[in-house]
Image: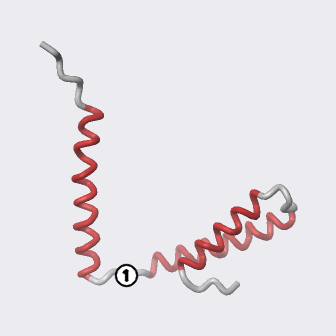
Amino acid sequence: MAEGNFDEITERLDEIIAQVRSKDTSLERSLDLFDEAIELGSRAVDMVDSFELSPREADMLDAELATEAQSEQPAEQAETDPEPSGA
């Protein structure tokens, strides 16, 4: 298994999903692929857990999330606000 970075791992996981969904894949092969997927998933989780943002990156991410939350807020209010009456 040569997958070394997060993108390679997710790409391989996508390949595994496609193979398992194929009707031509035997049960034994599907179980082998499942084992590989579990190992890849664990590696991906370890990568995410060990990833640290610099203070600047964290500030940029916080600002981006705040902007997204503000842009979603009017749409959410429109869904919950009652219709204005015509009177």
Which amino acid, mark 1? Glu
Q: Nearer the viewer, residue 45 or 62?
A: 62
State the residue position of label 1. Answer: 52
Q: Nearer the viewer, residue 85 or 54?
A: 85
Query: In the current view of this chain or complex, which residue is farthest to the front?
Result: 86
Q: Nearer the viewer, residue 58 or 17?
A: 17
Q: Position of residue 45 (x, y in %)?
A: 53, 73
In this figure, what is the number of numbered marks? Answer: 1
Query: Is the C terminus in the top left, top right, bottom left or bottom right quadrant?
Result: top left
Q: Nearer the viewer, residue 30 or 78?
A: 78
Q: Position of residue 3 (x, y in %)?
A: 63, 83
Residue 58, picture quadrant: bottom left
Q: Residue at x 23, y 60 (%)?
A: 66
Left or right for 48, reference 64: right
Q: Residue at x 33, y 80 (%)?
A: 53
Q: Residue at x 23, y 30 (%)?
A: 81
Left or right for 44, reference 48: right
Q: Residue at x 86, y 59 (%)?
A: 24
Colouring used for the render: secondary structure
Residue 60, picture quadrant: bottom left
Left or right for 15, reference 59: right
Classify 10 Å Cα crowding around label 1: few (below 14), some (14-19), many (20 and above): few
Query: In the current view of this chain or complex, which residue is farthest to the left?
Result: 87
Q: Secondary structure at mark 1?
A: loop
Q: Position of residue 18 (x, y in %)?
A: 71, 62
Query: Is the N terminus in the top left, top right, bottom left or bottom right quadrant?
Result: bottom right
